[in-house]
Image (spheres, rainbow, N blue to C red):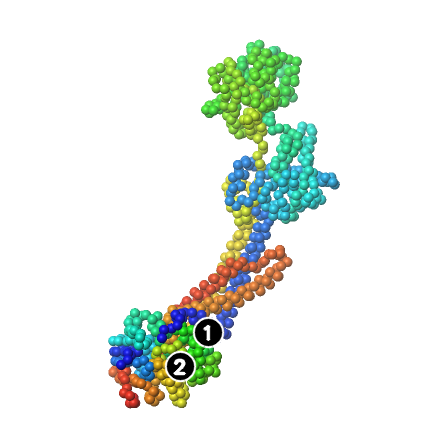
Amino acid sequence: MKHPVPAHPIRLIPGLAASHLRHDWILTLCLVVALAAVIAPLLVLMGLKSGTIETLRERLVEDPVYREIRPAHTREFPSEWFEQVARWPGVDFLTPTILPLSSVLQVVHPQTGRSELFDLIPTGPGDPLLLENGARIPGDGQLVLSAEAARRMGVSAGDALQVRVTRTRGTRTEEARETFQVLSVLDARAGSLPRVYAPLDLVVDVEAYKEGYGAPDRGWAGDTPEPFLSFDGAILLLEEPLDPIARTGLIINTGFARLADADRQQSQQRLGVPVPESLTVYDVFTPGSAVTVSNLRAIEQKLRGREAVVLPYVDALPLVDDQGRKMVLAGLSLSPRQARLLQAPVPPWGGFTGRAAPAGELTSVLVPKDHSSDSVQVVSDGANTLTLHLDVVGAGDWQHPVVPVELLGVLRTGTQRALTYRADTGSFEMARGGYRGFRLYAQSIDDVPALAARLQEQGLEFVAQVEAIERIQVLDEGLGRLFWLIALLGISGGTAVLVASLYAAVERLRRDLGVLRLLGLARWHVFFFPVAQGVMIAALGLLAALGGYASLAWAINRTFASELAPGERFCTLPGEQILIAIAATLALAVLASLVAAWRATRIDPAEAIREH
Amino acid sequence: MSTPMIRITGLGKDRSQGGSVFTLEVPQFSVEPGELVAVVGASGCGKSTLLDILALVMAPTRAEDFGFRAGEADSEHDIRRLWRLGDEASLAALRRDYLGYVLQTGGLLPFLSVRENIELSARIRGCGPAGQRLYVLAERLGLEGCLDRMPGALSVGQRQRVAIARALVHAPRLVLADEPTAAVDKARARAVMADLEALARDEGVAVVLVTHDVDLVSGHADRTYTFDVVQTSENVTRSTCYPLQQGVAA
C-alpha cells in the first residue's frame, strides 16, 4: 500500500516535543521560571541603559545649545572660510558674526519709551537656535527677541520696536533709527541674556554705521567707504629760506615732527620734475608715521602769506608692472599757481584735492616719450593685491611715469588697509572689515566632536559642549561594557541550565525516543526533538521575562516620573533591541540543545525493545 | 509457491559481552505474506536478537541473503546491502511504511493520550489522521472508552491492546511482537493473542511473534522456529535457529 500523502515525519517533532513539555509541566515550569529569572533582569538592565542614555542624549539633542560651536577669541574670517566650512559634513547652520562691541544696539519701546541696550546677534534661514526654540527666522524689518529681552522691554510677538544706532563722529553724536516688528520671542531655554536676533545684513549695517559709514538702503547717512590718503612726507618749496625760529615754528601743531633740508636729486625723483635752483627745498615728515591730509592742510595754513608750495610724496611702494618688474611711479598734482612756481607743466588732473576722488581721474598717467601703449598696468601688493590699468593721458620728458599723487596716497593706505578697486568706475573703496566670529550648529551632537577636531586642526580655539557630549558617550560605553559583563554571566548561567535540563530530558526519554525511532523516525528526525524543546522553553521563558520586564519598567518609570519630562523614560527598550534579545535567546537555546540533540541521535531503537 | 516477505539465508550475529561471546546462527528463515510465525525459546537463546534483526534495528554480522518484499508487486529490498551502506534513513523508512511493533509492555509514549499513541504510527507514515480505522480498531479491541486517557491510567492488558492497535493502524505488511503477553496473566494472554491473530488474519498481515511460551502459540502459528543452544567452550555460546515441525513441542 502506497501512502496517500508524502511522509514528513519531521513535522511531528514539534507537536511531540510540545506534548512532552505539557505532560511534564512541572519540570517545564521550573525551567521556564529559571530562564525568565535570568532574562528578565537582563532586559531591565538593558532597558535602564538605553533609557537613561537616551534621556540624557535627548536632552542634549533637543537643545541646540549643545550643538553650537563658536570661537573663543575674535579673529578675522574671510568669506571663503564660511563658504568652505558650510560644506563640511555635519554642519547644520553657519553664520558669520561681527565684533561683539559693534553689535550693541539701543532698543526703544515706541509707546512706553523704555530703552535698553541689547546685543544684536545675526541669524539666517535654518538657524536651529531660533527654529528649535519656538521662533521663526526674521526677514527684512523683523526681529526675534530672547525671552529676557522681551521681558525687559515688555513686548511680545507682533509688537513694534524701535532700534537706535548711535555713533560719535568728531564731537558730534549721530543716531540712526528704524522700527522693526517683533516676529517671535524665543523660549527661555535658548539663553538667559537679553538679545536681539536679526538678519545678517542689518547686523553688518549697524556695524558699518558705527564705523562712520552710511547705509543708503536704510536711509542712514554717513561716509561712503572712500579710502583716506596717507603719505610718507611732503616737499616744501619756498622762495626764501626759513630762519631757524620759523623752521621750528612751522611744524609745531601740524603733526609733522621734522623739517629737514631736502636733497634736490631725491626731490626730483619723488616729484618727477626738477626743482628750480631759485627755490629752497625742505622735507617735512614724521619718522615712522604717516602724513595725513589734515597734516598737509595744517602746514599750508601756517605758510599762508608766503610764496610756498607743499607737495606730498610717497616713497617705496611695492609696485610691479605686468611683467612682474619693479616699478617706480612719481606722484605730482599741481595747481596752475604751483606749476608756475615750479616752472613745470600743469598735469591734466590739476592740483591736489586731498581725496581719493573724483573716480576715474585717479588712474591717469603721464608716460615717458618712448612709451607706446595707451595704458600702463600696475600691480600693487598691499594688504590685498590691486591690479590697476592706468590710462595714458599724455607723454612728456619724464624719467618715470607720473600719476596723481592722490593715487600714491591711496596705494600707500592700501599697504595697511584692505582696499578694493572697481575697474568699472575706476574708484577705490575701503574693504569691509571681515567677519570676526561665527555661530555654527552641528547636525547632531555626535557630529560636534569631529567638527571640533577639524576646527582645532585650523588652530582655532572654540567653545563647544564637547565635554558634555563626550561624557555621555563615555557613560554609554561604560554602561555598555557593564551590561555585557553581567549579560555574559547571566547568559552562561541560563545556557548551562538549558544544556543540563535538555540533556537530562533526553536521558529520561531514551526509551520513548527509541520507540519513535522504531516507529520509523530517522536519526536526524529525533535530533530536532531537544532542539524544539529548547526553543519552546526559551520562548516561554522570554514571554515570562518580557512580562516581568514590562511591569518593572512601568514601575521604574512611574517612580521617577517626577524627574522626567513628558515622553521621557528611564527604562525603555527600542523595538529593535527587543528583537535582538529574542533572536539571541532563541539562538542560544538552539545552541544549548545541540549536546542533547547529539545525544538523542545516539539512541539505538533496539533499546526500546530491550526495555527490561 | 508465493514469494516470501522475508527471506534470510546464512545469517549470523556475534555479540560479545564481558569476555563471553554469543553467536546466533540463522541458516534459513522466511516469512510468507499473511503468515503467523512463532519464534519460541528460553531466555538467552537469542530470540530477541533475531527480532532486532527482523525489525531492521540491528545489523547482522554476516548474511548470505537478507531480502524484504512488502507485497507481491513490490521489488525486494536488499537489507544486507542497506546495512552495508549504513543507509539508516532507508531502513527507518521501511520500518515506518511496512512494519508494526507490539512491545513487551506496549512501548506507549507516556506523554501522549491513547488516541495520539495509536495515531502516531499513522502520522509518522504520513497517512494523516487514522479516523474511521482507528475507531474500528479501538472497538474491536474494546478501547472505545479510553481513547482520551493517558497510558499511565490504563491497566497492563489495556496498554497491550493499545499497542496492538498502534501496530496495525497504519496498515503495515508485517507485525513484530515481542513477548506481547509477558506482563499479563494466562487468561488475558490468550485474549491478547486471539486479538492479534484475528486482526492479522483479517488484514492479511504477517506476524512474527517472539515468546517463551510455546503453549500460547500452538494451534495459532503457521510456522514455528526455535533454537538449539550449545555452549562450545567456557566463554562461547552458539545458538542455531531452526524450524520446528508442525505440532511437535520443543
Tell me where residue B125 sits by quadrant: bottom left
The local crowd at label 1, few if under 14, some if 14 to 19, many if 20 or more residues have their Cα within 10 Å, is many
Tell me where residue A95 sits by quadrant: top right
Residue A457 position in % (x across, y down): 50, 41
- In this view, the residue in front, B78 or B129, is B129
Q: Which chain carries label 2?
A: B
Identify whether A207 is placed above or below B30.
above
What residue would you read off at disc 1? Answer: A20
**Disc 1 from disc 2: Cα separation:** 23 Å
Q: Which chain carries label 1?
A: A
Q: Which residue lies furthest to the top in this view?
A: A278
Q: Which residue lies furthest to the front in this view?
A: B73
Tell me where residue B203 sits by quadrant: bottom left
Q: Residue furthest right?
A: A112
Does any portion of residue A164 appear in the rendered image?
yes
Label 2 amino acid?
Answer: Ile
Identify whether A477 is placed above or below A593.
above
Label 1 amino acid?
Answer: His
Residue A361 position in % (x across, y down): 57, 21
The local crowd at label 2, few if under 14, some if 14 to 19, many if 20 or more residues have their Cα within 10 Å, is many
In the image, what residue occupies the spot 32% across and 76% down? B70
What residue would you read off at disc 2? Answer: B164
In the image, what residue occupies the spot 63% across and 45% down? A136
